[in-house]
Amino acid sequence: MTSQQSLPHRRTAVRPPYKVKFKSSLPLGGVRSSRVANYFNSQKIHKYWASLIARYGPIVRLVNPGLAPIVGFTSAEDCEKLNRITMEQPVRMPLASLKYLRDNWTDDFFEKRGGILVENGDEWWRVRSRVQTTLMKPMVVGEYVAEMDDVALTFVDRIQELQDKHGEMPENFQEELYKWALESVGVVALDRRLGCLGAPEGSLKARQGEELINVVNNLFASMAVTEIKTQLWRLFPTPSYRRLRVNHYKLLDLVGQHVAETVAFLGQGKDKSVAGRQNSVIQTLLSTPGLTQKDVLTFIMDIVFAGIDTTSHTMAFCLYLLARNPEAQKKLQKEVDEVTAGHQGPLTSKHLARLSYTKAIIKETFRIFPLTFGFARTLLRDVVLQGYWIPAGYNVFSLNILLGWDASMFPRPEEFLPERWLRDRPMGDIHPYASIPFGAGPRMCVGRRVAEQEMYTLLTRVASRFTVEYHHEDLEQLSGLVLYPSRPLKFSFVPR
Ligand code: HEM
C-alpha cells in the first residue's frame, strides 16, 4: 500500500506524511537483521527517531504492524497546536497490554475501570478530575515537604555510609535511588514511611521495599517489550506478557496490603492522618464523592508504579550532569548554602520557593536527558502538522527529546547551562513547548508537583553535604518504557 492510498480523502493543499516501513525487532521468524532491529535491541529507539528525522525531515510516519500508524514530528509550534486541539479530549495511546490485563482480570477487580494510566475518554476524566484536585494542589503536596526532607536526609546518610565502605558508589547505586523514590512517593501515596531506605540489609523493611521495587522494575521491563516491541501478546500470552501479569498481581497485592495498613492506622488516629496532617492524600481521596475504594486503590497503585523509575532515573542523570559540570555544581551549592543558612530543622515550602538555580538544574537535566521522548496524543479529528494532513485515528508524537538538543531552540545545546532557565532568560526566550518533560494540558503528569518537590529536596540535601564526582566512561540514555542511564552510577561523593 502506498502512503497516498493509505490516506483517504487526501487534500491537495497538504502532503501525506512520508511513509517509513517499520520492522519489528522480533519478527515471527526470529530474524534480527534489520537496521531497525539493531536500534531496538541496543535500546536506542530515540536514536532511531533522530535518524529518521535527519533523513526524512521534521515529520515522519512509522507503520507498525497491528497498530495505528505513528507520526513523529519536531516542532514546538506544532506541539502547542497538538495540545490545543486535543485539549478537550486528551486521548493518549493507552498502555494497551496493561489495559488488556486489567480489562480481563480474573476476579474482575477492575470492572473495566482501569485507572487513569490506561483509560481514555469519560472514564479517564471521571477519576482524573477527582484525583487531580488533591494531588496537584500545592497546599496538599506542600504538607509533605518535611517528610520528603527526612527521606532525603536518610538518603545522604546512606551515601556517606556507602562512600566510606566503597570509596565510591557501588555498581548498584541505582537501587539506592529506587529506594529513595519509593520511600518518597510512599510518604504521599501511603501517608507514612515504609522504612526501606537505610534499613539494615536483609531486614524485613529492606526486603519488603526491595520486593516492591523489583515488581515495579519488572513491570517497566515487561511493558518495554509489550508496548514498544512485538505485539504478539495480542495473539497469545508471550513471556513478557506473562511477566507483566505475574508482577501486576504482586503489585496489586503489595499495594493493597500497604493501603489496608494505612487505613487501619488512620482508623486508630480518628480523623487525622498518620503524621497528624488534616489533609492527607489518601484520606482525602477515600472521602471524595464519586471515587470508590477500588478507584483509590488503583490510583495509589498507579502512583507507586509511576513514582519510582521516573524520579530516580532523573536524579541519576542530574547527579551525572553536576559531576561533569563543576561550575554549575558550585553555583548550586552556593544557592543551597544561602537558602538554608542558619536553618537547623526540616526544609519548608518557603525554602523550596527560593531555589531558583536548583529548579533550573532540574529543567536543564530534562532538556538534555528527558525521561520520555515527548508529547503523545491520539487524534480524534484530522489535523495539519508541518504542512502534512494527518487523519483522525493516528497516534501523533511530538519528539521533544530532539527539540532539546536542537540549536535553533536552545543555543549551545551540547552545554549544561541551567542559567538559560532563570526567570530573566539570559540566553534568550525559550518556546514554552520546546521542553515539556511532564507533558501538557489536562492530561499532564498528575504527579508533577510530588516529583518536583522530591527532587528539589534531594538535590538541596545532597548539595549541602557533598560534591559529586564521576570518573568513569560517559553516561548515555537507553530507552525502555522510560529512558534510563546506560552504565552503573559509580559516583563519588566528596564531603564538603
Ligand atoms: C521525573 C519525574 C516524572 C516525569 C518526567 C513524569 C512524566 C510524565 C509524563 C510525560 C506523563 C504523560 C503526560 C501527558 O500525556 O501529557 C505522565 C503521566 C503520569 N504521571 Fe508522571 N512523571 C514523573 C513522575 C511521576 C510521579 C512521581 C507520579 C506519581 C506520584 C506520576 C504519576 C503519573 C500518572 C498517574 C500519569 C498519568 C496521568 C494521566 O494520564 O492522567 N508521575 N508523567
Image (cartoon, helix red, strand yellow):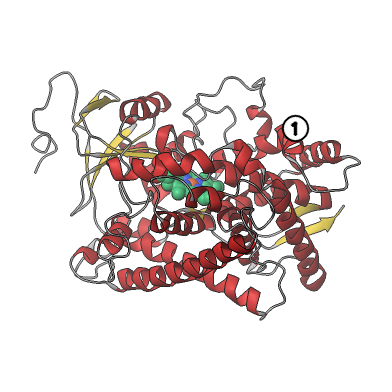
Residue 293 sits above or below residue 288 on the image: below
Above or below, 33 relative to 398: below
Crowd around label 1: few <14 · some 14–19 · many ≥20 (10 Å): some
Q: State how many labels appear.
A: 1
Q: Nearer the viewer, residue 317 or 135?
A: 135
Q: Is residue 224 visible?
A: yes
Q: Residue at x 69, y 78 (%)?
A: 201
Side of 101 relative to 491 (left or right)? left
Closer-to-camera residue (467/443): 443
Of all residues, the one furthest to the bottom in this rendering is 202
From the top left corner, tell me how far across and down residue 81 is, in percent.
35, 25
Q: Position of residue 339 (x, y in %)?
A: 82, 36
Q: Position of residue 378 (x, y in %)?
A: 27, 39
The residue where tag 1 is placed is 354
Give the SS element for disc 1.
Answer: loop
Residue extending furthest right? 342
Considering every residue shown, the one lying at the far front of the view is 270
- Whether label 1 lies within 8 Å of ligand 1 gets the answer no
Q: Is residue 478 visible?
A: no
Of 211 and 462, the residue lying toward us: 211
Residue 228 position, x and y percent, is 33, 56
Q: Quadrant of the N terminus?
A: top left
Corner quadrant of residue 439: top left
**Viewer-proximal residue, 322 or 355?**
355
Instruction: Please tell me which residue is depicted at 69% across the width and 53% down the height of the picture.
Output: 276
| Left or right: 166 in relation to 194 | right
Quarter where residue 264 is shown: bottom right
In the drawing, does residue 110 fall left or right of residue 21?
A: right
- The residue type indicated by label 1 comes to Arg
Residue 126 image-quadrant placement = top left
- Residue at image position (57%, 33%) is 413
